[in-house]
Image: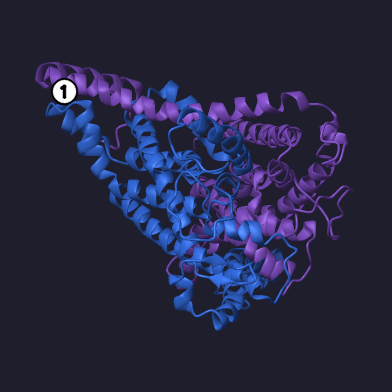
Chain colours: A purple, B blue
C-alpha cells in the first residue's frame, strides 16, 4: 500500500489537492469563515512584511547615512577622530582580513575532520560520541560574548597566554563558528549516498581512501557553503573581539603576533559611541563595508548551493 | 594480499584465514585519531569555557557571598563603594528578552505559517534567502541602525512617552526581536513542513478551511518544534551583546524597569567592562567572569530544553 509520503508530490497532485480543497471549501465553509481566512492571510503577510521592511530599512538607511563618505579614503586612510572627514578603515580592514585568514585556516581542517569522524567513524551507541554530538549542538547556541570570555581567560591570558594579538582573535572566532561549520559539513557528508562509499570499499579502498577520494569530493559544495556562511558570520562578529583586544585605536598596520590591532566591526562600534556627526557617518560607511562583504558571501553561498546541489 | 601471498597459499603453504589487512595500517589509524581529536575538541572547548568561567568566579564568590550576588539590587563594581548585586543586570536582560519575544514571536510565527502553508513556490524561493540575509546582518550594523535611526524615530513619533536620554531598552528589545525573527521563522517552518500531508488533506476532506488547517491541525502537530524555536530565540536574545550595548547603554546601576530609558544587561556589562585595560586579579576583573557564568548557566539550560524539544518533533514524523 502506498502511503501518502511515498507518493511524490508533483505539481499535478498539488493542483488536484488545491482544486478539491476549493470545492469542499465552497460547499461546506461558511462565508464568515471565508472572511476570517482572508483576514488571517492579511495578518500573516503583515508579519512577514515587518521582517522584510526591517531588512530593507537597515540596508537603505545605512547606505543613505554612509553616502557622503563612500570614497577611496575608507581603504587607504587609518582611523582618526581629529580628521573624521578623511579618516578610514585601512588598519581595521587589514586586521579583519588577518583574523579571517586565521579563522579559515583553523575551521576547514578541524570542522571537516570532526564532521567526518561523527558521520563515518563514530559508533552512536557509545556515550562519548553522543556527548560530542549534544555538546556541538549546545555550543552552537552559546552566546558569542561567552566565547570572548573564553578568549580572554584561556587564550589571551591563562593557559595559552599569547596576549592581545590578532592570533588570539582568530582562535576565539574559530572556536565560535566551528560548531556551525561542523553541522553544515555533517549535512553535506550525510547527503552522499552510502552506495558510493560501499562501491569504493568493495574495490579494496581503505576507509580513509574511500572518504578522501569519493565522499569528500562529492560533499565539497555543501562543506564550502557552510564555511562561507561561517566566514560571513565571523567578519561581522564584534562582541568577543571587544574582550580579546580589538578595541585599540590602532593607527598602524597590524602584525599577527603583536598586540595593537583593530577590526571593522569593533571600529564601527567605537566610532558610533562618539558624539560627532561625521564619525557617525564614518561608522555607517564601515557598516556598509561589512554589509557588502556579508551580502557578497551569502549570495555566493546561495548560488553555490543551487548550482551544485546534487540529487542522487 | 599481495601477489606473492597468493602464490604461497596456492602452493599449499599456510593459508591466511583472517580478513584483517596484511599491514597494520598505521597511517589509517593516525588519521582516525586526528579525526577523533577534531570532534573531541568541541568537548575540550566546553570544558575550557567552564574552567575559564569557574576559576575566577570562585575567587569572586569568596569575596562576595553568592546570596548577595543573586539578591542584591545594586550593581556598581567599578565604583569606590562597590556593590555586586546581580539583580539589576539580570532584570535588564529579562526586559530585553521580553520585548524581543513580544516582537519576535508574532512576526516569526506569522512568517513561518505563511512560508509553510500559504506561500507559492516562487515567493518561497525569494523570501527564504531574504530571511537568511536578515539573519546574516552583523549585529553592529543593526545596533547602529537602531541607535541612530530607530530610537530618534520612536522619540519623534511618540513624544508623549517619558523618554530619557538617547537610550531605550524597549526599542533595543524591538531591534533584538527583529534579529531573532529569522531564527524563529526558519525553525518553526521546518517543524511545520515536517507535518505529514495526510493530516492536512484529511482535514480539508472534512471541510476545514485553510485557517483551521493551519491553526488547528498543522500548528498543534508542530508545537514542540515551534516551542523549540521560541526557546532558541530566547537564548539568542539573552546573549545578544552589541545591539543592547549600543541601544540600551551600559551605565545603569540600580534595579529599573523603565522601558523608555537606559538599562544594563549581563552582556552589555561584560562587553563594556572587559575591554582589555582592566587589571587581572582585581574583584572587578573577576566580576566579569561571575556575570559570564550567570549568562552561561542561563543559556546552557535554555539550550538543553530546546535541543530536547527539537529532537522530540523530529522523532514523531520521520
Residue displayed at 59% across by 51% down: A181
Quadrant in the picture for the N terminus of chain A = top left
Q: Answer above or below: position of A137 versus B217.
A: below
Residue B21 is at least partly visible in this image: yes
Residue displayed at 50% across by 46% down: B261
Query: Residue B288: which quarter of the image?
Result: bottom right
Q: With B203 as the anchor, is B254 left or right in this view?
A: right
Residue A54 in the image: x percent, y percent?
51, 30
Q: Nearer the viewer, residue A220 or A302?
A: A302
Q: With A107 as the anchor, is A141 left or right in this view?
A: left
Q: Which residue is identified by label 1? A: A33
Q: Answer above or below: position of A267 versus B159.
A: below
Q: With A41 as the anchor, is B51 left or right in this view?
A: right
Q: With B101 as the anchor, is A215 left or right in this view?
A: right
Query: Residue A157: which quarter of the image?
Result: bottom right
Q: Nearer the viewer, residue A83 or A113?
A: A83
Residue A147 in the image: x percent, y percent?
61, 60
For disc 1, the neighbor class at 10 Å (few under 14, some 14 to 19, many from 20) is some
Tell me which chain the residue with mark 1 is part of. A
Residue A114 in the image: x percent, y percent?
59, 60
The count of marks equals: 1
Q: Name the secondary structure under disc 1.
A: helix
Residue displayed at 61% across by 27% down: A61
Residue displayed at 34% across by 28% down: A44
Residue A113 is at least partly visible in this image: no
Residue B205 in the image: x percent, y percent?
14, 27
Q: Nearer the viewer, residue B167 or B97?
A: B167
Q: Answer above or below: position of B19 versus A174.
A: below
Amino acid at each position: 500500500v502506498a502511503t501518502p509520503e511515498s507518493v511524490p508530490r508533483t505539481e499535478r497532485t498539488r493542483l488536484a489537492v488545491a482544486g478539491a480543497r476549493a470545492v469542499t471549501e465552497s460547499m461546506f465553509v461558511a462565508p464568515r469563515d471565508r472572511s476570517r481566512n482572508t483576514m488571517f492571510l492579511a495578518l500573516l503577510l503583515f508579519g512577514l512584511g515587518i521582517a522584510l521592511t526591517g531588512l530593507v530599512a537597515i540596508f537603505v538607511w545605512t547606505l543613505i547615512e554612509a553616502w557622503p563618505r563612500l570614497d577611496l579614503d575608507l581603504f587607504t586612510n587609518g582611523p582618526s577622530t581629529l580628521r573624521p572627514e578623511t579618516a578610514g578603515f585601512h588598519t581595521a580592514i587589514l586586521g579583519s582580513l588577518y583574523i579571517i585568514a586565521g579563522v579559515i585556516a583553523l575551521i576547514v581542517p578541524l570542522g571537516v575532520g570532526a564532521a567526518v569522524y561523527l558521520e563515518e567513524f563514530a559508533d552512536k551507541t557509545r556515550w562519548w560520541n553522543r556527548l560530542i554530538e549534544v555538546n556541538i549542538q549546545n555550543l552552537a547556541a552559546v552566546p558569542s560574548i561567552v566565547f570572548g570570555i573564553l578568549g580572554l581567560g584561556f587564550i589571551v591570558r591563562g593557559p595559552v597566554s599569547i596576549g592581545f594579538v590578532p592570533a588570539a582573535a582568530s582562535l576565539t572566532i574559530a572556536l565560535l563558528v566551528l560548531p556551525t561549520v561542523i553541522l553544515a559539513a555533517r549535512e553535506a557528508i550525510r547527503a552522499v549516498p552510502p552506495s558510493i562509499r560501499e562501491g569504493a570499499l568493495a574495490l579494496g579502498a581503505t576507509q580513509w581512501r574511500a572518504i578522501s577520494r569519493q565522499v569528500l569530493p562529492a560533499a565539497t559544495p555543501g562543506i564550502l557553503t557552510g564555511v562561507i556562511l561561517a566566514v560571513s558570520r565571523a567578519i561581522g562578529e564584534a562582541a568577543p573581539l571587544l574582550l580579546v583586544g580589538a578595541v585599540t585605536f590602532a593607527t598602524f598596520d597590524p602584525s599577527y603576533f603583536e598586540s595593537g590591532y583593530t577590526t571593522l566591526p569593533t571600529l564601527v562600534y567605537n566610532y558610533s559611541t562618539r558624539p560627532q556627526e561625521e564619525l557617525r557617518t564614518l561608522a555607517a560607511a564601515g557598516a556598509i563595508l561589512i554589509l557588502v562583504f556579508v551580502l557578497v558571501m551569502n549570495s555566493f553561498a546561495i548560488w553555490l548551493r543551487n548550482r551544485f546541489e546534487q540529487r542522487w | 594480499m599481495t601477489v606473492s601471498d597468493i602464490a604461497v597459499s596456492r602452493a599449499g603453504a599456510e593459508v591466511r584465514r583472517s580478513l584483517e589487512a596484511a599491514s597494520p595500517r598505521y597511517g589509517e589509524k593516525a588519521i582516525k585519531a586526528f579525526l577523533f581529536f577534531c570532534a573531541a575538541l568541541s568537548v575540550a572547548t566546553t570544558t575550557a569555557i567552564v574552567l575559564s568561567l569557574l576559576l575566577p568566579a570562585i575567587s569572586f564568590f569568596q569575596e562576595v557571598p553568592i546570596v548577595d550576588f543573586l539578591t542584591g539590587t545594586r550593581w556598581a563594581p567599578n565604583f569606590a563603594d562597590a556593590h555586586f548585586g546581580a539583580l539589576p543586570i539580570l532584570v535588564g536582560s529579562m526586559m530585553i528578552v521580553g520585548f524581543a519575544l513580544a516582537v519576535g514571536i508574532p512576526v516569526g510565527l506569522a512568517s513561518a505559517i505563511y512560508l509553510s502553508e500559504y506561500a507559492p513556490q516562487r515567493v518561497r524561493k525569494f523570501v527564504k534567502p531574504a530571511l537568511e540575509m536578515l539573519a546574516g546582518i552583523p549585529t553592529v550594523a543593526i545596533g547602529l541602525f537602531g541607535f541612530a535611526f530607530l530610537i530618534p524615530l520612536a522619540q519623534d513619533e511618540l513624544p508623549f512617552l517619558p523618554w530619557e536620554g538617547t537610550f531605550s531598552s524597549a526599542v533595543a528589545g524591538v531591534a533584538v526581536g527583529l534579529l531573532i525573527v529569522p531564527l524563529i521563522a526558519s525553525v518553526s517552518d521546518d517543524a511545520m513542513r515536517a507535518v505529514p500531508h495526510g493530516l492536512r488533506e484529511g482535514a480539508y476532506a472534512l471541510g476545514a478551511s485553510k485557517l483551521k488547517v493551519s491553526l488547528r491541525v498543522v500548528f498543534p502537530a508542530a508545537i514542540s518544534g515551534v516551542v523549540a524555536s521560541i526557546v532558541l530565540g530566547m537564548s539568542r536574545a539573552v546573549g545578544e551583546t552589541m545591539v543592547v550595548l549600543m541601544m540600551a547603554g551600559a551605565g545603569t546601576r540600580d534595579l529599573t524597569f523603565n522601558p523608555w530609558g537606559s538599562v544594563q544587561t549581563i552582556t552589555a556589562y561584560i562587553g563594556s567592562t572587559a575591554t582589555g585595560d582592566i587589571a587581572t586579579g582585581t574583584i572587578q576583573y573577576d566580576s566579569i567572569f561571575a556575570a559570564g557564568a550567570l549568562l552561561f548557566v542561563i543559556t546552557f539550560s535554555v539550550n538543553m530544553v530546546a535541543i530536547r524539544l527539537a529532537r522530540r518533533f523530529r522523532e514523531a514524523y520521520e
